[in-house]
Image (cartoon, coloured by chain):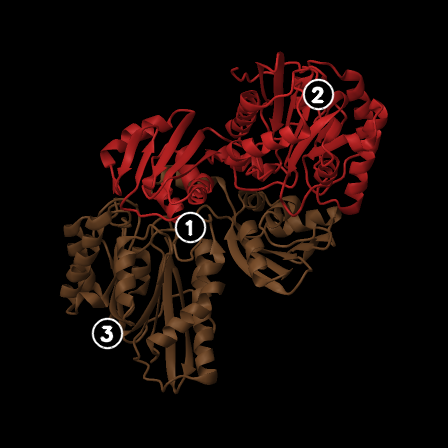
Chain colours: A red, B brown
Amino acid sequence: MAVQLEPRPVNGFRFAGVTAGLKTKAGALDLGLIVADRPVPAAGVFSTNRVLSAAAMVSRSHAKAGRLQVIAANSGCANSFTGKQGMKLALESCKCVAAELGCVPELVAPCSTGVIGHLYDRDKYAFGARAAGLALTADGLANFARSIMTTDTRPKIASTALRLGGSEITIAGCAKGSGMIEPHMATMLAFIVTDAAVSAAILRAAIRDSLPRSFNAITVDGDMSTNDTLLVMASGAAANRPLSGRELARFRSAFNQVAYSLARGLIYDGEGATKLVTIEVRGARSDTDAEKAARKIANSPLVKTAFFGCDPNVGRILMAAGGSGAALDSEKLDLSINGVRIAARGALMIEALPAAAEKMRQREFGVRLDLRLGSGSATILTSDLSYEYIRINAEYTT
Amino acid sequence: MAVQLEPRPVNGFRFAGVTAGLKTKAGALDLGLIVADRPVPAAGVFSTNRVLSAAAMVSRSHAKAGRLQVIAANSGCANSFTGKQGMKLALESCKCVAAELGCVPELVAPCSTGVIGHLYDRDKYAFGARAAGLALTADGLANFARSIMTTDTRPKIASTALRLGGSEITIAGCAKGSGMIEPHMATMLAFIVTDAAVSAAILRAAIRDSLPRSFNAITVDGDMSTNDTLLVMASGAAANRPLSGRELARFRSAFNQVAYSLARGLIYDGEGATKLVTIEVRGARSDTDAEKAARKIANSPLVKTAFFGCDPNVGRILMAAGGSGAALDSEKLDLSINGVRIAARGALMIEALPAAAEKMRQREFGVRLDLRLGSGSATILTSDLSYEYIRINAEYTT
């Protein structure tokens, strides 16, 4: 039941990614469709940013019913901070896609990512919707994943299969986003589909269960986008018997693994990232305290530049934890990097620093802070802060 | 009563900055003294980071009495996260300085800045304390200001004079810090001295009044240091009559201006800063909401890289405000840069962007976000996020 970072067909779904001309770069894929053979159970979660994109507002409203047939995602334009015109455009886009595919507009969830404050061209979108409708295939997930990329350097895809309820069940998904990432749902878009026969309630529970350990446990820059969306659909084509008990737990576990793989992929491909760092805080007074400390460490520019410089900088990590609001006694804590202890019971272990620096030269490593005050814990994935992050964001207009 | 960014003598005080050898760079000033002719009214505020440096703990304890005679500040070593040994070192340093100057150790406020997790050399410190004691002069503030610099590229000094209570009164100060700056008191050190005859209570009130608009209204990287300290001493040498009413208000106003100038200097010299940006949020539901939004904008890496790129990026600014938790209606707000409106009643004004970009090419500019929901307002000073910030922090160990 290992998760693979590759697409695979999911019975009951077709996918496409085409060029509509919404991105300025000629030939770039910028409009994608995920289409179920019929209306199917669906669930979604969305950015909690007060500036929510028109697309996300419409998707949220359509997903509320627990049934969707189509996900229509475009890159090149976020349709956010576009007021009433943006809302009109999002609704029209649903109509346009629905007409192409022969369903009602309320079964279409529109998703947009790209520059904020601008509207996309209606005619280009309509052309793209037609082209995508014609291009739909069972193995089109890779193209779909490419069509939603913005500053991403590569598509993020994950899939798995397992035997459940008497049937072979597949779960596959993709995600985009590399800046404006501290989800709580942001310019992250993530889509997971399965052929399992499960209800919208089961999908909602699966999302709820996985979010704190996947998309809500990652940060590139601490910024929350206006468009964050995770949408999940289940075609039921696997025709399994109803899942409950241990089988349901296995479904959730597989779902969690796909979600985690996608979330991890977002950080691995974080803007300018040269490191993927797992920040684990344990021994906190509470899980909330642990999360506060882990997030503050994960978002500190000083800590992140130290990661970039392969500098086992105890001071910056403790400064961040100490400033997080979490209860902390600097004379009790332990700190280690990939198992190399660099602070023990509040004392810096200078002789261990070279070994820790060596561990930090790897593409991935872990920082573990044990506060030794209680049993609260939290884990956050983050990236480093590099010259390339500056280049990307000083030269690119989102 | 204009504030000048230059030192001037303050009656009743002598200053020195010498080379003790605590910094690795040969010949660098790294130990400074501010010495009053006798014990004088004093007040201080300190980092609220849970990892508080030994020096700050001792200073806080000594300042509590409302009387100090000496500020002894060193750079090159923060004496933070150094446990019991660090505390012992800070107390010994007070004794050493007190012996040189002929006062009791409880009248000495020690301040340290530099690398965290290390102890400084006792003998070098003792040598420096003697050298500084011998070097004390009335016009030594400039040397003192240099002796506390770390990644600062230049000293931050401000002074003013005014007639009050029948006397000519001077207020002068200096500050250091360019990274790990979002004070609430952090590796910022700031010192203000005056020859006014005022009580410790008046000094405390002056600090309380000025902080929200000076040192607590600035951010370079959102990180809070373990050593932040602001200390204020009043020699009384001006022999003015007691200040009250309008005269006290004028004293506070002059104090505020010196504090603001120093705080502004910290941001102007922020690590890698090429811009000084004033973020003003008005029309918020409450002042708290306004501050939340202003801080989130001021600390957003995406906003700060856009500042660096002279990009009037409406989307990123609104994304930050929208994610701050402040109440916000994206169809009501106005946004402008140095008077150029780039969003009005929730609509992006594309044609105004080139003019706004032009304003952003200046070394300083202002961003004003009017939420049009109420009368809450807040102003935060920030810097941009540049390649140089990465270079400094990936290569320097704090």
Residue named by callout 3:
B39
Q: Is mark 3 on a helix, strand or loop?
A: strand
Residue named by callout 2:
A235
Disc 3 to disc 2, how far (Cα)?
Answer: 80 Å
Residue B93 position by quadrant: bottom left
Question: In percent of the image, x 79 and y 25: which residue is there?
Answer: A128
Q: From the image, which quarter does the C terminus of chain B lie in?
A: top left
Q: Position of residue A355 (x, y in %)?
A: 28, 28
Task: Tell me the amino acid under the disc marked 3.
Answer: Pro
Identify which residue, B392 or A270, lies in the foreground. Answer: A270
Residue B15 position by quadrant: bottom left
Local packing at callout 3 (Cα closer than 10 Å; few below 14, some 14-19, many 20+) is some
Q: Does residue A212 sit above or below A130 in this rendering?
A: below
| Mark 2 / mark 1, whichever is N-terminal | 2
Q: Is mark 2 on a helix, strand or loop?
A: loop
Q: Position of residue B322 (x, y in %)?
A: 62, 48
Q: In this view, does B89 lie to the left or right of B243?
A: left
Identify which residue, B269 or A179, lies in the foreground. Answer: A179
Disc 2 to disc 1, how far (Cα)?
Answer: 45 Å
Question: In percent of the image, x 38 and y 45: which residue is there?
Answer: A285
Question: In percent of the image, x 63 and y 40: which residue is there?
Answer: A47
Task: Tell me the amino acid under the disc marked 2.
Answer: Ser
